[in-house]
Amino acid sequence: MLNEKHILILDDDAAAREQTQLVLNFIGEQTLARGLDEWLSGKGELGDDTDISVSDIGLIVLTPWAEESAFNKVLKRITDIRDNVPLAILGEDYSIPDDLDPSMKQAIVAQLAVPLHYNHVNDAIHRAQRYNEAQNFAQDQRGRRPSHLFRSLVGTSRLVKNVRTVMSQVA
């Protein structure tokens, strides 16, 4: 459902990681599960057992820590490794810190209650898909010139205004 992208589950608790992976696999998503410390120490490498690159990740699901500053550092490391990736945080009790970078706040698309519910997971996946589409669109638009630039080059004479008026009536 994530346009052929995978969901990366980052959790140091192996049992919780496997349970989350089982639920996501059951609803038809392609998942990878890694320990957070293992993934961060490998600088985002997914290991030799897979041919998936970091750019194939469409959503990262991770668990927060009780210590806010450590979690902020982890979020920063994740965005350094894979920029513009949506994040879903497991656990409703966690509140997003106020001093978190605004771009990272925007990347957090959902907070999922444990145990996972189909509707909440499906909503998070949908939000991640829309986030990825918006990021791809923004990257595509970086090299293009704005349309108002063309209008300013053509001019604002009376004849040009008449042509625009006629064109707007047709459209």
Image: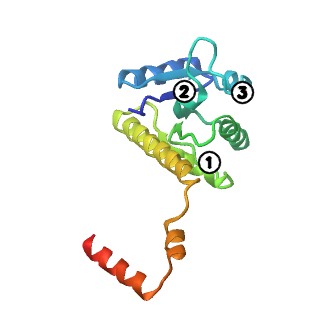
Mark 2, secondary structure of its residue: strand
Mark 1, secondary structure of its residue: helix
For the residue marked with disc 2, what is the amino acid?
Ile
Q: Quadrant of the N terminus?
A: top left
Mark 3, secondary structure of its residue: loop
Q: Is residue 125 above or below residue 152?
A: above
Looking at marks 2 and 1 on the same chain, the residue that comes earlier in the sequence is marked by 2
Horizontal and vertical percent position of residue 151? 49, 73
Which sits in the foreground, 64 or 149? 149
Q: For the residues marked 2 and 1, what is the alpha-carbon distance in whole angstroms?
A: 18 Å
Left or right: residue 62 compared with residue 1: right
- Give the residue at x 42% y 37%: 125
For the residue marked with disc 1, what is the amino acid?
Met
- Which residue is labeled 1 in the image? 104
Residue 9's label in the rendered image is 2
Looking at marks 3 and 2 on the same chain, the residue that comes earlier in the sequence is marked by 2
Snapshot quadrant of residue 15: top right
Left or right: residue 118 compared with residue 91: left
Q: For the residues marked 3 and 2, what is the alpha-carbon distance in whole angstroms?
A: 16 Å
Which residue appears farthest toward the front when viewing the image?
Answer: 159
Task: Please rate how many residues cluster around mark 2, counting C-alpha atoms within 10 Å: few if below 14, some from 14 to 19, many from 20.
Answer: many
* Tag 3 near tag 2, CB within 8 Å: no
For the residue marked with disc 3, what is the amino acid?
Lys
- Which residue is labeled 3 in the image? 43
Which sits in the foreground, 66 or 14? 14
